[in-house]
Structures are given as structure tokens and as C-alpha cells.
Image (cartoon, rainbow, N blue to C red):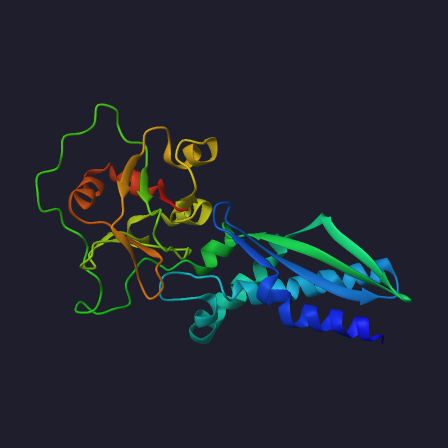
Amino acid sequence: MKISQIYKLLFFVLTGFLFAQDIDWVNKTITTEGAAYGKNKLMAKRGAKTDARRNLIEALKEIRVDSKTTMRDLEVEEDLVVTQASGYIKQAWFDDNSVEYERDGEKWMCTISITMPLLGEYSQAVLPSGKSKGTAETKAPAYKPTSTPPPPPAKPYTGLVIDLRDNKVVPSMAPKIVTKDGAVIYDMSRVSRQYATEMGVVGYIKKVGNPQSMIRIGDNPLVIKAQGTTGMTPSDAVVDGDGAELISSLNQKILKECKVAFLID
């Protein structure tokens, strides 16, 4: 094998799944790449597809389930969950437009990308149950309104947007909305699992009012500016005061049907 081939293979071994991956939280997909050599294009492409699938499985382990847990953490605690989730790479598809070939001496090198949705069966496998495993002393309390609910708006709200711009946000599959004291305003226990698996517990959006976001939050969402983010990694939104009161006064169907979005930079 030529020196140039060795360097190229080392590059993909060392950087393949660590860097050649893209988690698109807006569209809820994950994409990784694969690369391989073969004596012809067909064999190189076949090897690249195998490598891409392998890298996808590794990349899925880094998906953040919530502010405390990644899939890699679940691998230790719940083998069944990880086995089920890894099995869903059959939902993934290869992008033929991403295929690239390079001739290197007598061999061909091929690179290809593979994309998988994070919704549907994968979400069903990895999302928390919504039932706290903690004791009465350790589980986070639910938020309780402290004042009279505000009067309803002239036009009913169609969704909820938490404005997290200018905050560090680490997206996850099951983020929460909490007060600065840790009281839970919104989490898996307040949603329909069917909607959570099909839509995601929250949507991540870059703009309010565009067609993509309106599918989730409608044309008249309640927009609340967050005080910040929290959690072992900053995945959960912090909302206090009037914002927490307003969310509590919403039609609970909005929360149950996951018509909630985090507005991020």
C-alpha cells in the first residue's frame, strides 16, 4: 500500500465518526460519512456504505437524550434500549449525490454519507418514559402557579416558543422547561408519547413565522424569553415569573401535543 493510501486511511479512521457527522436538530436528522478502498468502484462503494453504517452507530451513542444522559450512558444502564435504537439504522438512507470517487494507483477510494431520522421508531426507543425514577424527596416538583391566571388573549395561542437566543444551548431529545428553583413546567410527563415520538418533545427553530415552524406552533404562538439554560449540560430552558405563569395558563393541549419550540441562534 502506498504512503498516500496509508495517510488517507488513517485520516478516516481517526476523524471519520468524530468529525464527519452532522446532527441537524431543526430537521431532527443525523448524518455521518463512510470511506473505503476497493479494487473497483463497486467494491469501494460497498465498503464505504459499511463504514458509514458503523460510524452512524457510533455517532448515535453521542446523541443527548436529556441534560444528564447520552445514548452512551444508556449503553451501560439499558442494553435493550441501545440495541433497539441501533437497529433502527434500517430507517437510514444513503445520499447518492454525496458519493465521491478518487483513483489511487490501482485502487479506488469512495466516500458516501448516510442520514437517519431521529423521530419515529428511534424516538420511541430512546425517549424517557416520563415517570420519575426518583423518590418523593429527589424528584423535581411540578411548577404551581402562584397568582390568578391572566385573561385569555383575544386570539387563542396556537403554540409556545421559548426564546433561547444569546444562550448556550445543547439540544437534546427530551429537554425541559424549569424555573430557576428547579420546578418543572414542561417535560415528558406532560406530553403525549405519540406526539413526542412523531414530532419531538420540542422543535428547534431559527425563526418564528416561517412555514416550517408554523407547522408545529401555528400562526399565533406565545413567545417567552428564557432567563437562561440549565442542566448538567445546558439543554433545559429556565423560565420564571410572569413567563412561568403564562405557560401554566396555556391550553394544556398545546403542551400535550408538543406544540413547543426552542428558538435558538
Q: Which residue is drawn at the image coordinates 80% and 56% (left, top)?
A: 101
Q: Nearer the viewer, residue 2 or 81?
A: 2
The quarter in which the N terminus is drawn is bottom right
Q: Is residue 103 left or right of residue 230?
A: right
> Which residue is depicted at the point 33% across and 54% down?
188
Q: Is residue 216 above or below residue 193?
A: above
Considering every residue shown, the one lying at the far top of the view is 154
Residue 258, can we see it? no
Residue 70's image quarter? bottom left
Which residue is found at the position 39% from the left and 66% from the top?
69
Residue 7 is left or right of residue 87, and the answer is right
Give the left or right position of residue 173, taking residue 243 as reference: right
The mark tally for this picture is 0
State the residue in front, 15 or 143: 15
Residue drawn at x 19%, y 46% is 244
Spot occupied by residue 194 in the image (x, y as percentages of width and height): 41, 47
Image location (x, y in percent) of residue 30: 56, 54
Whether residue 260 can be seen here: yes
Tell me where residue 182 appears, x and y as whole percent: 21, 59
